[in-house]
Image (tube, rainbow, N blue to C red):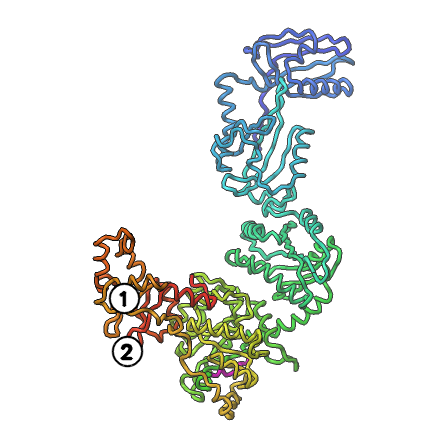
C-alpha cells in the first residue's frame, strides 16, 4: 500500500513429528527453547500424541493426514495442544507427505495460552466486551452467565437472569417451526446464526443478530454460548428480512404466514361477502422511510384481532377485513364502508402526516365471493389491483373485480365533479325555512348544498356529500356554503326580519380534528362581521357523538357556543347514541330525522320515539326541530308533542336566493296553522318535580310535633314556615341527631322529654338552596353536577313557599325519564 512493503510476522517452530501410517511408528521432536513453559511429552505412537488434543480435533487431524497421503497436497490445521505440565499452545500444523505412507508435520506456536491472572484478563476482555452480548447456558438452556451488554439491552439485572430459561427473551413473534429448525441446525452443525426478535423486561421487542454455539467438554458436558448484537439502532440491516414467519423490522407476519392464516380462516356463508384483502404501499418519506415503516407497523400490530395484518416486503403491507353481511345493502357501499372504518382506526393512531402518506400511496382490493371464490387468489388479486393502480393522483383505491371497476369509473365522474365544484366554489346554496311553532314565522333558514349539472346530468346530494367526505374535501365544501349563506344573511334579514338566523352544516368526517373544525368556524364567523347569535352550526348525530365526548373535543365546541353560536344535532335518532349523551348538553337544538315523521301517527312506534326525544330535550333546555313535515296531520301531532320548530315541504322546498320569496308562501294558509300554535314556555320546569305535600309547621312549635309526624307517616322532612316564608327544614337526619336512643322507650328519661319541648326554631336547618317554581328542569342537572345541598326550597314568583325537592324526588323524576344523572 502506497509503496510500503508489508510482511506477515515470522512463525516460530516448536517442533515436528513424523508418522508412518502403515507401521504406526511415531516420532515427536519438541524444540524446548521455543516453548520453555512446556514439558516434553513422551509419544511413541500417534495415539499418545492425539491424547494431547480434544476429541473433535483428533478426528479432524486424522482426516487431514488421510487426505495428504491420498492426494499428496500439503495441508495446514490449527488446534490446541495440552502439554503434560498443563501448558496449552494453540498450534498451526503444516502437514506434508514424505513418502507413500509417511507424514511429516512441522508445528508452529500461534498462541501460548496464558494461565492464572493472564487468562482471567483475556477471558474478561472477551466476555465483558461493550459491542456484543454474551450469554452462557447449560444443556437445559438455563442461563449461567450474561455480560453487561445483555443486561443493558434487555433491562434485566444479572441476578434476575441467572437460572432462568432463555425463553425469558422470547418475544412471542416467531412460530414454533422457527425454533424447531433452529435447534435442529444446532444439533446437526453445532451452531446457529440468524436474526430474531427479543423481548425486554418491560415487554418491548427489538431485533437482534444472534449466534448460538454448542460447546461439549471432554467430560461429556454440554453448554451453549450465545453472541448477540442489538439491531434497534441498525434497522437498515434487517430491512425486508424474514425470520420465523416474521419480518424483523415491521414485526408483522410475512406473506407466507399471512396467506396461510387467511386461507385457513375463510369460510363461505350465505349472504356474506369477504374477507376483504387490502394490499397497499404507502408513499413514505424517503428521508424517514424506516422510521415511518416501523411506526405504521406498530399501529397495524395493535389492530383488533378480527383484522389480519402482514408485511410482504418492498413497502407492501396487507390488511384482511372480516366477512360482512350484504343481504340488505349495496356491496360496493359496504366494501367502501368497511375499508373506511378499518383505515379510520389506523388514522386515529398514526402521527403527523403518516396517514396522508398511506392513502396517497397505491391500494389494491380483492373480495372473497366477489372477484374470486378461491381464498388462495385473494392476495394475488389484491397485489395485481394495487400494481395496476390508476394514474389519477386522487384515486386512492383500485379493485380487482370488473363490475366494481365500472362502479369505480362512475365514482371517478363523481369525484371529478365534486373536486371541480368545491375548488372552483361553483356550488349552489338552497335555503329551506325552519318555522317556529309558537309564531309560525320563519326563525331561520337551513343552507343546503347543491352540485352543478355536468352535461345535463344531475347528482343526488347525499351521495355527493359522501364522496366529498371520502376525498377529504368536505370541510372546504362546508366553508364554501357557510360563506355564501352568511353573505346572504343581511339580505334575508331585510326580508324576513332582523332576528332571522341561518343554519349551516359542518361535517366532522374529515382529517381535521374537532378542535380544528370548531376553531375554523369561529374564525369564519368573526371575519364575516355577522353576530354569532344569528348562526347555527349543524352537526350530524353520528359524527358528533362518534367524535368522542372528551375534554379535547367539548372545550372548543363550548367555546363556540359561548361566543353566541348555536349548535344543532342533525338527524337525531338515526345514529347509535345513547340518551345518556343528552345530559352533556353541549348543543342547543335537536333535529328529529324525517324518518320518524314520514309515518307518524298517534300511538305508533315513531310517535313514542318522538315523544320521548321531545320530553327529554325540553327537560334539558334543548329546543327540538322536526324535519320532513309534509302534511297538516304531521303538524297536528308534532305540535301536540310540543315540538318547537318544523321544517319540510309543507312549508317550502329548498329554494335559491332568487326564489326566496317562495319560502314564505305557506303564510297564505296561516289560518290552518293557528289552531296548532304551541304556547311559548311549555318546557318542563320544577313544577314537574316539587313535592307540594310537605307538612308545614310554625317555628315556635315543639319537637313533639315532628316526632308525631315521623311516627305515623313515611315522610322524610317537614318545612318550617313563618308568614308564607320557609325559614327552615327538619328531616329525619336532623331529628335523629337531636333525639336520644331512649326516647319513646320504656326506659325513657326526663332529659328525653326535655328534647321534645325544644322549639323547632332551635333545631331546624336554615334553607341553603332557594329556587323558583318556573325554573327549567335543565337547571336541576346543573345543580346536581355542582352538588347543591338538598333539600331545595321551591318558591313562587312572590317568594312564597311552594314545597321541597329532596334527593328522592330528583331520583324518581329522572329515572322515570330514563336519564342517567351520574
Placement of 254 over or under 350, stated as above or below: above
Q: Tag 2, which secondary structure?
A: loop
Mark sitting earlier along the chain (1/2): 1
State which region is magenta. Answer: 428-435
Location of residue 766 (image quadrant): bottom left
x, y percentage for residue 740? 27, 53
Looking at the image, which residue is at 48% across and 83% down?
Answer: 435
Q: Tag 1, which secondary structure?
A: loop
Along the viewing direction, whichever of 119 and 250 lies nearer the viewer: 250
Which residue bears the numbered disc 2? Answer: 798
x, y percentage for residue 482? 48, 76
Looking at the image, which residue is at 62% across and 77% down?
Answer: 460
How many numbered circles does the render carry?
2
> Taking the image as drawn, is residue 91 in sight?
no
Most prominent secondary structure in the magenta stretch? Answer: strand
Cα distance, mark 1 to mark 2?
17 Å
Horizontally, is 165 left or right of 623 in the view? right
x, y percentage for residue 584? 43, 66
Along the viewing direction, whichever of 616 and 139 lies nearer the viewer: 616
Marker disc for residue 767: 1
Placement of 762 over or under 747, stated as above or below: below
Looking at the image, which residue is at 27% across and 51% down?
Answer: 747
Amino acid at each position: 500500500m502506497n509503496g510500503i512493503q508489508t510482511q506477515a510476522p515470522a512463525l516460530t517452530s516448536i517442533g515436528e513429528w513424523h508418522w508412518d501410517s502403515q507401521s504406526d511408528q511415531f516420532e515427536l521432536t519438541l524444540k524446548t527453547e521455543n516453548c520453555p513453559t512446556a514439558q516434553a511429552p513422551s509419544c511413541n505412537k500417534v495415539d499418545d500424541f492425539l491424547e494431547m488434543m480434544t476429541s473433535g480435533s483428533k478426528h479432524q487431524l486424522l482426516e487431514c493426514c488421510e487426505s495428504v497421503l491420498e492426494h499428496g497436497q500439503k495441508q495446514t490445521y490449527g488446534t490446541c495442544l495440552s502439554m503434560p505440565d498443563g501448558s496449552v499452545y494453540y498450534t498451526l500444523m503444516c502437514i506434508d507427505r514424505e513418502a507413500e505412507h509417511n507424514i511429516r508435520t512441522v508445528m508452529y506456536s500461534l498462541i501460548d495460552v496464558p494461565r492464572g491472572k493472564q487468562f482471567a484478563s483475556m477471558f474478561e476482555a472477551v466476555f465483558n466486551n461493550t459491542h456484543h452480548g454474551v450469554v452462557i447456558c447449560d444443556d437445559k438452556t438455563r442461563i449461567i452467565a450474561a455480560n453487561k451488554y445483555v443486561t443493558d439491552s434487555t433491562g434485566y439485572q444479572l441476578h434476575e437472569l441467572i437460572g432462568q430459561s432463555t425463553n425469558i427473551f422470547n418475544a412471542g413473534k416467531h412460530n414454533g417451526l422457527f425454533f424447531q429448525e433452529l435447534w435442529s441446525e444446532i444439533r446437526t452443525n453445532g451452531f446457529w446464526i440468524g436474526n430474531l426478535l427479543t423481548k425486554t423486561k418491560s415487554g418491548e421487542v427489538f431485533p437482534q443478530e444472534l449466534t448460538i454455539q454448542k460447546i461439549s467438554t471432554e467430560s461429556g458436558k454440554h453448554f451453549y454460548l450465545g453472541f448477540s448484537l442489538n439491531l434497534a439502532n441498525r434497522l437498515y440491516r434487517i430491512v425486508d428480512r424474514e425470520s420465523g414467519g416474521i419480518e424483523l423490522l415491521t414485526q408483522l407476519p410475512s406473506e407466507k404466514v399471512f396467506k396461510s392464516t387467511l386461507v385457513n380462516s375463510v369460510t363461505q356463508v350465505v349472504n356474506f361477502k369477504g374477507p376483504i384483502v387490502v394490499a397497499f404501499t404507502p408513499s413514505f418519506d424517503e428521508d424517514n422511510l424506516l422510521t415511518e415503516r416501523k411506526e405504521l407497523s406498530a399501529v397495524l400490530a395493535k389492530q383488533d384481532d378480527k383484522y389480519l395484518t402482514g408485511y410482504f416486503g418492498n413497502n407492501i403491507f396487507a390488511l384482511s377485513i372480516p366477512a360482512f353481511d350484504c343481504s340488505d345493502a349495496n356491496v360496493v357501499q359496504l366494501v367502501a364502508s368497511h375499508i373506511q372504518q378499518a383505515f379510520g382506526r389506523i388514522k386515529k393512531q398514526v402521527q403527523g402526516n403518516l396517514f396522508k402518506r398511506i392513502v396517497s400511496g397505491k391500494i389494491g382490493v380483492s373480495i372473497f365471493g366477489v372477484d374470486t371464490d378461491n381464498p388462495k387468489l385473494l392476495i394475488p388479486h389484491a397485489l395485481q389491483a394495487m400494481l395496476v393502480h390508476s394514474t389519477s393522483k386522487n384515486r386512492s383505491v383500485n379493485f380487482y373485480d370488473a363490475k366494481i371497476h365500472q362502479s369505480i369509473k362512475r365514482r371517478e365522474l363523481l369525484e371529478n365533479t365534486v373536486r371541480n365544484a368545491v375548488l372552483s366554489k361553483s356550488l349552489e346554496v338552497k335555503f329551506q325555512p325552519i318555522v317556529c311553532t309558537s309564531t309560525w314565522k320563519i326563525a331561520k333558514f337551513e343552507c343546503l348544498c347543491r352540485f352543478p349539472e355536468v352535461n345535463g346530468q344531475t347528482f343526488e346530494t347525499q351521495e355527493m356529500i359522501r364522496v366529498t367526505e371520502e376525498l377529504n374535501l368536505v370541510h372546504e365544501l362546508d366553508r364554501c356554503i357557510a360563506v355564501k349563506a352568511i353573505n346572504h344573511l343581511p339580505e334575508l334579514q331585510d326580508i324576513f326580519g332582523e332576528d332571522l338566523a341561518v343554519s349551516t352544516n359542518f361535517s366532522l368526517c374529515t382529517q381535521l380534528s374537532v378542535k380544528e373544525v370548531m376553531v375554523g368556524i369561529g374564525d369564519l364567523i368573526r371575519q364575516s362581521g355577522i353576530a354569532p347569535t344569528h348562526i347555527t352550526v349543524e352537526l350530524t348525530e353520528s359524527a358528533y357523538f362518534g367524535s368522542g365526548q372528551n375534554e379535547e373535543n367539548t372545550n372548543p365546541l363550548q367555546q363556540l357556543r359561548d361566543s353566541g353560536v348555536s349548535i344543532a344535532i342533525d338527524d337525531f335518532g338515526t345514529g347509535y347514541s345513547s340518551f345518556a349523551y343528552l345530559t352533556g348538553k353541549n348543543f342547543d337544538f335537536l333535529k328529529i330525522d324525517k324518518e320518524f315523521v314520514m309515518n307518524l301517527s298517534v300511538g305508533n312506534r315513531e310517535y313514542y320515539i318522538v315523544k320521548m326525544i321531545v320530553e327529554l330535550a325540553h327537560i334539558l333546555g334543548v329546543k327540538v326541530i322536526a324535519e320532513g313535515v309534509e302534511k297538516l296531520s304531521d303538524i297536528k301531532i308534532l305540535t301536540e308533542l310540543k315540538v318547537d320548530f318544523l321544517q319540510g315541504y309543507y312549508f317550502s322546498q329548498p329554494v335559491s336566493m332568487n326564489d326566496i320569496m317562495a319560502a314564505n308562501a305557506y303564510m297564505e294558509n296561516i289560518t290552518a296553522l293557528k289552531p296548532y300554535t304551541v304556547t311559548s314556555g311549555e318546557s318542563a320546569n320544577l313544577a314537574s318535580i316539587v313535592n307540594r305535600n310537605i307538612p308545614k309547621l310554625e317555628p315556635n312549635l315543639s319537637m313533639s310535633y315532628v316526632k308525631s309526624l315521623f311516627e305515623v307517616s313515611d315522610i322524610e322532612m317537614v318545612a318550617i314556615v313563618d308568614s308564607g316564608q320557609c325559614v327552615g327544614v327538619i328531616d329525619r337526619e336532623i331529628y335523629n341527631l337531636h333525639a336520644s336512643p331512649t326516647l319513646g322507650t320504656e326506659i325513657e328519661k326526663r332529659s328525653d322529654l326535655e328534647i321534645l319541648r325544644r322549639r323547632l326554631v332551635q333545631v331546624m336547618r336554615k334553607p341553603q338552596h332557594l329556587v323558583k317554581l318556573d325554573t327549567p328542569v335543565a337547571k336541576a342537572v346543573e345543580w346536581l353536577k355542582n352538588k347543591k345541598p338538598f333539600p331545595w326550597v321551591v318558591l313562587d314568583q312572590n317568594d312564597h313557599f311552594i314545597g321541597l325537592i329532596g334527593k328522592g324526588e330528583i331520583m324518581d323524576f329522572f329515572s322515570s325519564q330514563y336519564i342517567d344523572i351520574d
